[in-house]
Amino acid sequence: MTELSAVTIGLVGFATIAIVLSYAKMIWRKRKFPPGPLPMPVIGNALQLMSEGLMPSLVKMSEKYGQVYTVHFGPRPTLIVVGYQAVKEVLVDLGDIFLGRGTIPVFQRFYNNSGLTLLNGEHWKQMRQFSLLTLKDFGMGKKSLEEPIQEETQHLVEYFRKSNEQPINPSTTLSCASANIIASILMSKRYEYTDEKWMKILQDMRDSFEIISSPWGQMYDMFPDVMEYLPGRHRKMFDLLKELRDIVKENVKIHESNMDPSCPRDYIDCFLIRMKQENLDSETCFDKTNLVATVFDMFLGGAETTSVTLNFGILHFIKYPEIQEKLHQEIDQVIGRTREPRLEDRNQMPYMNAIIHEVQRISDVLPMGCIRSATRDVTVRGYKIPKGMDVLPVLSTVLQDPTQFETPGKFNINHFLDENGKFRKNNGFMPFAAGKRVCIGESLVRMEIFIIFATILQKFTLKSVVDPKDLDISPTESGLESIPPSHKVIFIPRE
């Protein structure tokens, strides 16, 4: 036997022993977790999860193992929580225990392991409190933000009017509108719909999320160390967001050079002021790395998820013309044809309010929710969950829980209307998650969606270029995000 052969045999033997020991450790740990499918060495339950698609697989497994069960994303054990009651238990009843952020390899790469989304413990509490107060100071959730949203919506109206009733794809323009609203709060910026460079950046953002939500992105989240070295579409998802990240960095640099501490203009200014106040504290989370990551995160969340919801809404409007007709009647009755819609109109418009809620529910924009982790040992439904274990509350199973919604798989306005035609709340409505780590921009998104939808439908009748019966509005991908299909729309002025 040659020396090379001996070394090869030794390495193979060593690798085999390592795999066997790793698998033995996995199986030993598994016996302490809630039930779930038997994982394979190294790859865990990847084959079962990817065979029918991630979301369908998770739902199907819950039928066998219950509302709380264990899945191995690669070698990583994760507690899966499905259905309204179980998700409420984790996010609300035990919310203080499940405040930790779990493992999200894609976001960890995006945000350089920094920013509000990924912070934990005291740093997360400080950053969230600061961000909430600062965003409120600049109008989030208040009437003072109504005017900028109305102004941006008028730009949308003019853009759609100039289409002269020719079919157009509104998706990137809607992205620009929602991006401009959050950009005004974060960095005092607004971009024109004719800015080709900016529109390309927004399209790149959409393309990146499409890859993240595809099997390529899901495989990266399971095996980040391996996928880093393999060819495939997943390698593009980070490059597609580079220009947006560079714009955030550039705006931070500009703010540093011309900021007036006595008159902060936006979120970046306020963060820089806080940085100077804490510059002697070596343990502070208020540094430039967290600033860039947090602004980048808020921008992605505020622009992308809002525009996706707007796109799904328009698709439902052209799919169901009878809905538009009723919405036009309500708008004409409450607002009229000339006055700009205001947030206070929502209380007088139960049909519009219910439609928006049902669009958000059925569109299921973030079906996976966002992974959490246990901050200490805890018992959930009789199972001991160790500190640090990843926990995935699957929001899609809440929005489609038959105990909360009569026809969970179908668009049904009566999920949010009572027998008298008045708006009614539904506990299963959790598109923004729930508890103390609920989406920080919820009030802003709700305000945007109402004013934009009400204004567009006040001014236009929307028509599909194909027979509505033949229009498929189901997502093209459904992973981290549900991706709406691309369709052209005709905007006909209501004169």
Image (tube, rainbow, N blue to C red):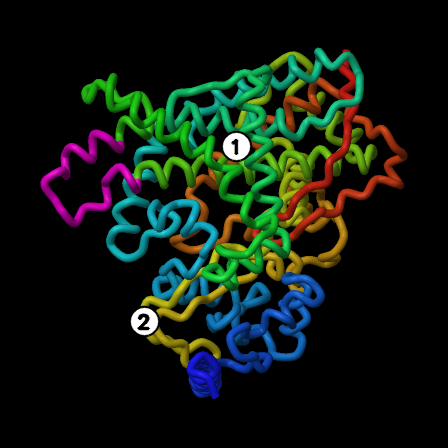
Q: What's the mark number on residue 94?
A: none
Q: In which quarter of the image is the C terminus?
A: top right
Q: Residue furthest front?
A: 2
- Magenta-span inclusion, residue 284: yes
Residue at position x 79%, y 18% in the image: 492
Q: Quadrant of residue 485?
A: top right
Graded by Cα atoms within 10 Å as few (under 14), some (14 to 19) or many (20 or more), the crowding at tag 1 reads many
Residue 255 position in % (x across, y down): 29, 22
Left or right of 375: which side holds 63? right
Residue at position x 76%, y 20% in the image: 491
Left or right of 34: which side holds 258? left
Residue at position x 64%, y 22% in the image: 455
> Which element type, helix, strand or loop, lies under badge 1?
helix
Q: Give the range drawn in magenta.
A: 271-290
Amino acid type for the residue under numbered disc 2:
Arg
Q: Can residue 284 be seen here?
A: yes
Mark pair 1, 2: CA separation: 36 Å
- Magenta-span inclusion, residue 107: no
Depth check, front residue: 314 or 210: 210
| Residue identifier under label 1 | 447
Residue 25 position in % (x across, y down): 42, 84
> Which element type, helix, strand or loop, lies under badge 2?
loop
Residue 385 position in % (x across, y down): 41, 76
Q: Can residue 32 be seen here?
A: no
Q: Quadrant of residue 60?
A: bottom right
**Mark 1 / mark 2, whichever is N-terminal:** 2
Q: Quick check: 35 above or below 93? A: below
Amino acid type for the residue under numbered disc 1:
Met
